[in-house]
Image (cartoon, rainbow, N blue to C red):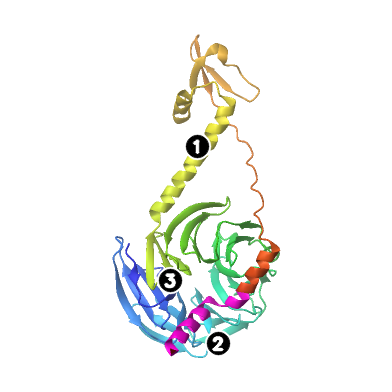
Amino acid sequence: MPDIPLKHQCFDLKFSPTADQVYVGLLNGAVKGFSYDSEGNASQSFSLRPAKQSCRGVSINETGDKLYAVSKDRGLRTIDPARGTIIEEKLGAHDSAINRVLACTSSIVATGDDDGVIKLWDPRKQKEIKSFTHHFDYISDLIFTQEKNQIVASSGDCTLSVIDIRSSRTEPFAQSDDQDDEFLSLCSIKENTKLVVGTQLGMLSIFNRSSASSYLGPVDRMPGHPSSVDALVALTDDVLATGSSDGLIRLVQILPNKLLGAVADHGDFPVERLGLSRDGKWLASASHDEVLKLTDVADALEESEGEEEDAEMEDVWSEVAEEEDEVPKGALAAALLTGRGVKRPAESTASSEAGDVVVEEDSDMEIAVVPSKSRPKARSPSPPQPPKSEKKEKQKYKKQRGNPSRAVEERVAFFADL
């Protein structure tokens, strides 16, 4: 599918849950909507500019009739995506620039700002419900799981937190320890029993979601990204798409952990936001190249499933070869495909302690059925940890870097004054 030109850098994107529409928030403060079809043809459905400063985040409710947008000007706005008009506006919703917005339910919308403050709102009244101040650096991502009624937030302070929207308390349900690595993106998988976190050092940290204490630290880490993982989105229950600052979009399998390969790229520009269409076909990505890239991932997922089946068959071959090395591979392949066994001379077959099944077919020949054995898989070694000196350098860079959205806005303002 060809790229959709935007004319300005895209800060955030969201697909509609009820229609073939995708919405973007841009650096110049504009919010745009695009319609697309199954063939990949796209056209602009609306464009408006509710704020003069950058639109950093967009989110849409589960019925697809309300689009929420937050801006650097600290405003929270509700847009009708069908007509492209502003329904409601809340100015000065935060004391600092708002970085993320998330429509949780019909009665709760969450926002997070540059100072780490998270607020819950009732969109029906544009009224603040409660505020959380347990983070001290910008909120980098927000996700919501309805069955758990929990909001998970990641922050530039190297921690994540969990908020129970049913609780009346203004303290989080859980918060991780300082992980010495900036948390940038979040994704829930495995029927919401696992949480994957993209980090500044390029590691994928995997958390259990069984209890409050399980969020204190990750149970596993997956290396493989040479640069920071700025965006995550689940394609299936165990396959993710990752957007990295090296410009590549990769597919990754979690538990078992495996890097499946790259499916798209934005050249030398960092991939900062990802989204998946409601039918799971189109993967949208945003970077600094002022285009919205839509990639068909349906074929890529089919290819990865085929590779997994081939790998499983190779494991079967290796196991059988060790126990039945006297049987020709051609005959063994026929046995595996038909399930009827392999013919061989009677004197060469004997019932073994391993449980080989031998069935008499005639006086001269016998049929040997391959034993169904499975060996325990070797555990993967613990992922290597970066040296302490490298960690310190990365953390020093992280402190200098701050919020990526804010850094882009400062560069644009500098060149505008020249």
CB under 8 Å between discs 1 and 3: no
Left/right placement of residue 300 relative to residue 224 reads left
Residue type highlighted by circle 2: His
In the figure, residue 197 lies in which quadrant?
Answer: bottom right
For disc 3, the marked residue is: 14
Left/right placement of residue 210 relative to residue 282 reads right
> In terms of depth relative to the viewer, which is nearer, 148 or 327?
327
Rounded to the nearest angstrom, the CA distance separating label 3 from label 2 is: 22 Å
Residue type highlighted by circle 3: Lys
Q: Position of residue 198 (x, y in %)?
A: 57, 65
Is residue 138 rendered magenta in the image? Answer: no
Q: In the structure shown, which secondary structural element does the residue marked by tag 2 occupy?
A: loop
Q: Position of residue 380 (x, y in %)?
A: 64, 47
Rounded to the nearest angstrom, the CA distance separating label 1 from label 3 is: 39 Å
Left/right placement of residue 197 relative to residue 302 reads right
For disc 1, the marked residue is: 313
Q: Position of residue 1 (x, y in %)?
A: 32, 62
Instruction: Report the disc number at residue 94.
Output: 2
> In terms of depth relative to the viewer, which is nearer, 23 or 355?
23
Is residue 403 rendered magenta in the image? Answer: yes
Instruction: Report the disc number at residue 360.
Output: none
Q: In the structure shown, which secondary structural element does the residue marked by tag 3 occupy?
A: strand
In the rendered image, is residue 108 in sight? no
Q: Indicate whether 213 appears above or below 60.
A: above
CB under 8 Å between discs 3 and 2: no
**Image quadrant for the C terminus?**
bottom left
- The dominant secondary structure in magenta is helix
In the figure, residue 5 lies in which quadrant?
Answer: bottom left
- Read off the magenta span: 398-417
User: Counting residues from the N terminus, which is met first, the one under dot 3 or under dot 2?
Assistant: 3
